[in-house]
Amino acid sequence: MQGVIKSYDPGTGDGVILCDTDLQEYELDPRALHGSVFRTVRQGQRVIFDVTADGLATHVRLGSEADMGTPGFPPRNPEPTHEPA
């Protein structure tokens, strides 16, 4: 899923992501930034994320403009497969 950071408190790690597709708000899982390139995030920052079974945003990461579906950037082509001759 992709969305925008609506709010984030770097002191507590509490935050909310607003999903692009359904405009639903997802609270950040306490471990949402663990193992990511982020130490912190800022309001308005575009991210890609997953949702846990409990409905929390997790595995927050950066995406390319193509991953985000930004107008003017063509979708990323899948890697070509090489079949034996």
Image: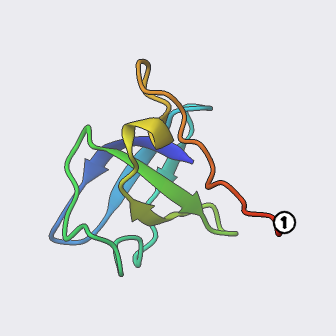
Residue 70 placement (x, y as % from top left): 43, 27
Residue 56 placement (x, y as % from top left): 55, 63
66 lies above or below 40: above
Residue 55 placement (x, y as % from top left): 63, 61
Residue at 41% in and 62% down:
60
Q: Which residue occupies the extreme top position in the image?
A: 72
64 lies above or below 10: above
Residue 2 placement (x, y as % from top left): 50, 44
Q: Camera-side residue: 48 or 8?
A: 48
Q: Amino acid at mark 1?
A: Ala
Mark 1, residue position: 85
Q: Camera-side residue: 59 or 63?
A: 63
Residue at 57% in and 38% down:
24
Residue at 22% in and 43% down:
43
Describe the element under mark 1 as helix, strand or loop: loop
Horizontal placement of 63 versus 37: left or right? right
Horizontal placement of 56 versus 10: left or right? right
Q: Camera-side residue: 72 or 13?
A: 72
Quarter containing the C terminus: bottom right
Mark 1, residues whose alpha carbon is within 10 Å: few (<14), some, or many (≥20)?
A: few
Q: Which residue occupies the extreme right position in the image?
A: 85
Horizontal placement of 57 versus 31: left or right? right
Residue at 61% in and 55% down:
79
Give the number of marks.
1
73 lies above or below 32: above
